[in-house]
Image (cartoon, coloured by chain):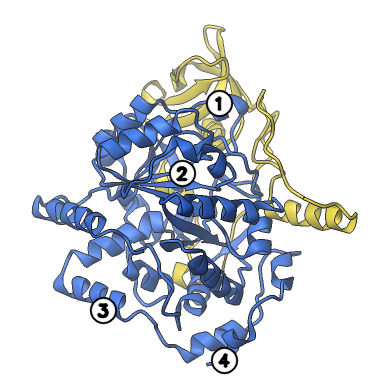
Amino acid sequence: VTGREAGHRAGTPEPDPDALEVIERGAREQLEGWVPELADENELRQALERAFDYRGDVLITRKDGTQIEGYIFDRRPGSTLADSMVRLVPKNGAGKTSVFYTDIAALAFTGRDMAAGNSWEAWVRQYWERKAAGEKGISLQPEKLE
Amino acid sequence: MPVPVSQMWTVASYVLKQKLQGRKRYPLVLMLEPLFRCNLACAGCGKIQYPGHVLKMQLTPEECFRAVEECGAPTIAIPGGEPLLHPQIGEIVAGLVARKKYIYLCTNALLLKQKIDLFQPSKFLTFSVHVDGQREHHDFSVCLEGGYEKAVEGVREALRRGFRVTTNTTLFDGADPRSVREFFDEMMELGVEGMMLSPGYSYDKAPDQSHFLGRARTRRLFRAILSNRKENWRFNMSPLFLEFLMGKRDYPCTPWGMPTFNVFGWQRPCYLLQDGYADTFAELMQSTEWASYGTESGNPKCANCMVHSGYEASAVNDTFSSLRGFWDTVRATLSNRYPDPRALELLHEPVRPVHAFNPLVQIENHAPQETRV
């Protein structure tokens, strides 16, 4: 599932984009810590699609028992599990690698969701609270890298 | 100081060459992201939310040069992350200048004074400094009180040393058009070569947000801002793209016009959407399902996009596709005031941001003469 298919909500007619004042988007899913059941091919494909959208590391356990943890930056779904793959940057610093869908036994959303909680609304609320408390030089700072 | 004739000629001759070769899809600007790491933490940013081990990754100069050669675009924009955090950014820029590429190094300028000795003034190098509006607006937008002052200090230092400098401004929901127009005055007074503008985009992978500017609201905002222009305002952009933002013309998206290369590879399909990566530029061009993207495709992820990375290339293509397009560009360049009484009325209308608690509308520092016809 790519591009247009991925963006469409099934059964929902799309409004004229030029007439829209505001775009409504659903809230992000809370996926951190999730361990999806991978009972069938459909569940596996859907879970990997969510893992591709996830802004944190995931842990993949292969059917041979080996594990790899890292950030999924690409997925290439094919017509069968054998010709479908995810591509990831391992957490241990090794180079980019691929895992075929057919080799995956388990998936876990182990890393922190780096996009969670950083919304504009959260900043605005925080800003006014800190301002009201008399704070000067208010800012958000990037996290220190480990 | 306007855009050098040599740059205009390079871009024009490049586009004409593509046309003569019958190339339907060609890149205009390479968006080269050498790293995602940033020294700002702008709320809602959809560009840099990655685990630490990804933020530590960076392109080598050789990887940058290879991407530039593969792509072949005459212009390179270097965004990020903050490119001045890259330890070899001086080497990367020098290598691109040696290849006679026109470079826009996009920076928040927090480190510009400190790092400016890494660079030599050149017609090929422009610092494109991120300033999102007047002081309070910019500081709030980048979540850093004092950020505007540092950016302006960087601009002044770069200009003093003879560098080309533009500003780049992203306008979000709640932008006050009167304040934006005053901001244009301030930047022109500062002496920048030109200004770049774009509406914000709702990054699909951005932090959780439920509302974004739609196209109708974006057009109204830009009509208010860009009509009744002052004579001294200079924009470093296609004049037809500015007319597109004002709602005076419509274009389909050209997602391949500004391809993106970063630590993951060649990003599909464009600078904004991340629908996967290709390993080579040729693979990106050949294997991406281009018809699935752009507002006209019906893809909801593209529904509110009017961003330069998709539509400025469409405008440039229009300029060189017909005599009409060329004439429209000449007309828009020579006659660029766009008198519009209705747009002046729009300046009076209260800003009604979708986001609650938005403090920007409470800043009341616009000049009274702006409200007169």
Q: In front: A131, or B230?
A: B230
Please name the color used to draw chain A.
yellow
Tag count in the figure? 4
User: Where, by quadrant of the figure, is residue A59 drawn?
Assistant: top right
Amino acid type, residue under disc 4 in the picture: Arg
Confirm or deny contact between disc 3 and disc 2 (CB under 8 A): no
Label 3, label 4: how far apart the Cα atoms are? 26 Å
**Residue at 48% over, 91% down:** B341
Q: Which residue is mark 3?
A: B331
Left or right: where A102 falls relative to B354: left
- The tag on residue B372 is 4
Distance in Å between CA atoms under marks 2 and 4: 38 Å
Q: Chain of mark 3?
A: B
Of the numbered discs in the image, which one, if any, rests on residue B79? 2
- Farthest residue in the right direction? A133
Q: How many other residues sit within 10 Å of disc 4, few (<14), some (14-19) or many (≥20)?
A: few
Q: Single out the residue that lies furthest toward the left.
A: B20
Lower sequence index among marks 1 and 4: 1
Sequence order check: which comes first, mark 3 or mark 4? Answer: 3
Distance, label 3 to label 2, CA atoms, is 32 Å
The disc placed on residue B219 is none
Residue A7 picture location, percent across and down:
47, 50
* Observer-nearest of B317 and B370: B370
Q: Amino acid at mark 1?
A: Lys
Q: Position of residue B315 (x, y in %)?
A: 30, 64
